[in-house]
Image (cartoon, rainbow, N blue to C red):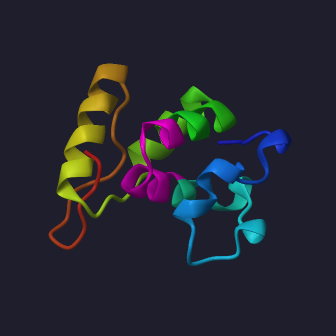
Amino acid sequence: MKISPSSLTLPSRLHRLFWDVNVSEVRLPDHAGWVVERVLEYGDLEDVQALARLIGRGPFLELVARARIPSSKTKRFWDQVLKLEGVSCTRKSSRETVWIC
């Protein structure tokens, strides 16, 4: 999946979700999966919408389908969203990690 050059950095709206890293060093093309996982787990609806607009709906849903989500509540929510969108999950469940599907 390719993310456009115009979306290399995180929008300022999302900076609060990355309290533990230097946000200026987080580049979407290099860290897209991790960024999506963080926004899914800690962000609100507006954060999710901002990220989806930034990277595009299709690439966003692909990343969601591959995401690792530690919270079972968040996992169940995104599992339902993916089903409604007709996107197949690419992760398998394991005992130690909760996957989206």
Q: x, y (%) of residue 49? A: 53, 33
Which quarter of the rendering shows the C terminus?
top left
Q: Residue at x 30, y 40 (%)?
A: 78
Say if 16 sits above or below 86 in the image. Answer: below
Which quarter of the rendering shows the N terminus?
top right
Question: Of residues 14 and 65, which is closer to you in this image?
Answer: 14
Q: x, y (%) of residue 98? A: 23, 61
Q: Is residue 5 left or right of residue 27?
A: right
Q: x, y (%) of residue 48? A: 49, 40
Q: Main secondary structure of the magenta part?
A: helix
Stretch in magenta: 36-48
Q: Is residue 94 magenta?
A: no
Q: x, y (%) of residue 29? A: 72, 53
Q: Is residue 47 magenta?
A: yes
Q: Residue at x 79, y 51 (%)?
A: 8
Say if 54 sits above or below 9 in the image. Answer: above
Q: Residue at x 47, y 59 (%)?
A: 38
Q: Is residue 55 left or right of residue 27?
A: left
